[in-house]
Image (cartoon, rainbow, N blue to C red):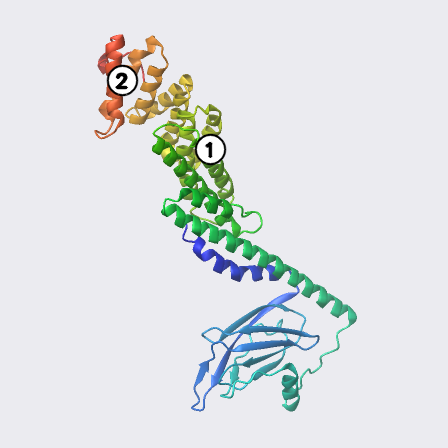
């Protein structure tokens, strides 16, 4: 689920410069190949060749290296310039292509060198070499006006500022991913407190700063929520009761997962985002339940119901699952009328739904109203008949049925004698 994060930093490194370039209509890119022609006539790519790019109309210098196929791409070159490209590498003679305007030649002819001593020319040596060759250095190139220079300087400053801005974004992303990956490792080692601290750091990444931050942000928040839940459950289970120390972790879990859901819902590029969101809604569901069941935090129910409505909207095939979760929260909060209404609505379309039968039966028992005990016994008996044999709730329900019989002389009726409707 989180594997793409491991690749994000490298991908973003390539993208940030592109983002910077896009911000300035004054710049563009150029690409080409550096090759060497050997004595036997064979032509081979030159990997790792250094290409010095000099601007001829005003002062400017850039560098780029070729990849293993001899290919290079340089972006961010001012469009209005005239350039010379000179390639050098161990084992070749420095070779250049002169008088390039990248608006006209964004893909250079191959730079074909011959074997040599690997010299790298200075700009002065290059100019001397050009003057000594048959190709003039700057044919027809006019001297730039003061206005041209001012525009070029402004474009260069804007470009430099953008590069610095995106370097800072890259650093922030790299730091967040480092904390995220450390958190994953600590969580796998059951060091939940350490994992929480790392995920908290990763979750400080602002998803509004850049599109590349979005996925890292919501997955960090979701991992933080899940780890808080696990830490709370661990404290709860070790003490075998609802100790106060566990409660803040369940509270932080629902807070973080709600934020993760908000952020993830804005991701329009992830084709799998609905499945991701359903994972998050499930984290929310299991985190909110102990707050209601063991700590009496009934004020979280209304927000939880809204969350489950959102889940239903993208998971219509499993609508009853989310309705059951609503009913359970109502039941645990002793909001009996709302719980019964939800469970009856489910049973109206799915009479054999064991979860709804269980929920409505216990709700009616807990209501304390004697006139509802018969229906309670009937629902609970139906649950026992529909539940899987290994369902741990069966033993609990059988105890409740026995208690109803012993205390109130109430037993489940045969279905043929029942007056209620499911």
Which residue sits at x=43%, y=53%?
A: 4
Whole-percent x, y for residue 19 in the image: 58, 59
Which residue sits at x=55%, y=73%?
A: 64
Q: Quadrant of the C terminus?
A: top left
Left or right position of 347 against 202 = left
Seen from the viewer's position, the closer of residues 162 and 223 is 223
Tag 1 and tag 2, C-beta contact below 8 Å: no
In this figure, which residue is indicated by the disc labeled 2? 400
Q: In the image, is residue 294 above or below residue 409? A: below
Mark-to-mark CA distance, 1 and 2: 33 Å
Residue farthest right in this picture:
146
Does the rendering let one see residue 410?
A: no
Q: Residues within 10 Å of mark 2 (few under 14, many from 20)?
A: some
- Using the image, tell me which numbered label, if any, was put on residue 248: 1
Q: In the image, is residue 234 above or below residue 119? A: above
- Secondary structure category for the residue under label 2: helix
Left or right position of 118 against 398 = right
- Secondary structure category for the residue under label 1: helix
Seen from the viewer's position, the closer of residues 241 and 358 is 241
- Using the image, tell me which numbered label, if any, was put on residue 379: none
């Amino acid at each position: 689920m989180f594997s793409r994060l491991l690749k994000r930093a490298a991908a973003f490194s390539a993208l940030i410069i592109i983002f910077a370039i896009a911000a300035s209509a004054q710049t563009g890119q150029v690409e080409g190949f550096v090759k060497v022609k050997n004595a036997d006539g064979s032509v081979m790519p030159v990997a790792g060749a250094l290409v010095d790019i000099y601007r001829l109309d005003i002062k400017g210098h850039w560098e780029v290296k070729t990849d293993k196929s001899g290919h290079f791409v340089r972006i961010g070159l001012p469009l209005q310039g005239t350039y010379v490209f000179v390639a050098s590498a161990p084992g070749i003679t420095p070779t250049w292509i002169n008088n390039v305007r990248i608006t006209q030649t964004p893909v250079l002819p191959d730079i074909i060198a011959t074997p040599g001593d690997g010299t790298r020319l200075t700009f002065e040596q290059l100019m001397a070499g050009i003057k000594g060759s048959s190709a003039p250095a700057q044919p027809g190139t006019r001297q730039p006006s003061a206005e041209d220079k001012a525009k070029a300087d402004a474009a260069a400053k804007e470009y430099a500022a953008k590069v610095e801005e995106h370097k800072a974004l890259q650093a922030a992303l790299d730091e967040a991913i480092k904390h995220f990956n450390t958190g994953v490792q600590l969580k796998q080692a059951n060091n939940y407190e350490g994992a929480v601290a790392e995920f908290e750091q990763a979750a400080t990444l602002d998803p509004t700063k850049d599109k590349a931050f979005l996925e890292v942000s919501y997955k960090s928040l979701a991992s933080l929520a899940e780890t808080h839940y696990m830490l709370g459950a661990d404290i709860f289970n070790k003490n075998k009761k609802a100790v106060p120390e566990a409660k803040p972790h369940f509270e932080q879990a629902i807070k973080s997962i709600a934020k993760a859901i908000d952020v993830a819902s804005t991701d329009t590029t992830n084709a799998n985002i609905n499945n991701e969101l359903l994972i998050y809604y499930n984290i929310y569901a299991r985190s909110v339940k102990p707050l209601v069941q063991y700590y009496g935090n009934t004020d979280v129910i209304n927000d939880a119901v809204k969350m489950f409505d959102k889940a239903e909207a993208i998971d219509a095939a499993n609508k009853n699952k989310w309705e059951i979760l609503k009913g359970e929260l109502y039941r645990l909060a002793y909001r009996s009328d709302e719980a019964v209404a939800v469970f009856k609505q489910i049973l109206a379309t799915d009479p054999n739904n064991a979860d709804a039968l269980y929920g409505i039966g216990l709700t009616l028992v807990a209501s304390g109203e004697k006139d509802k005990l018969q229906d309670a016994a009937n629902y609970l008996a139906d649950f026992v008949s529909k539940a899987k044999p290994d369902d741990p709730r069966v033993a609990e329900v059988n105890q409740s049925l026995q208690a109803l019989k012993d205390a109130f002389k109430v037993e489940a009726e045969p279905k043929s004698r029942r007056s209620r409707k499911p």
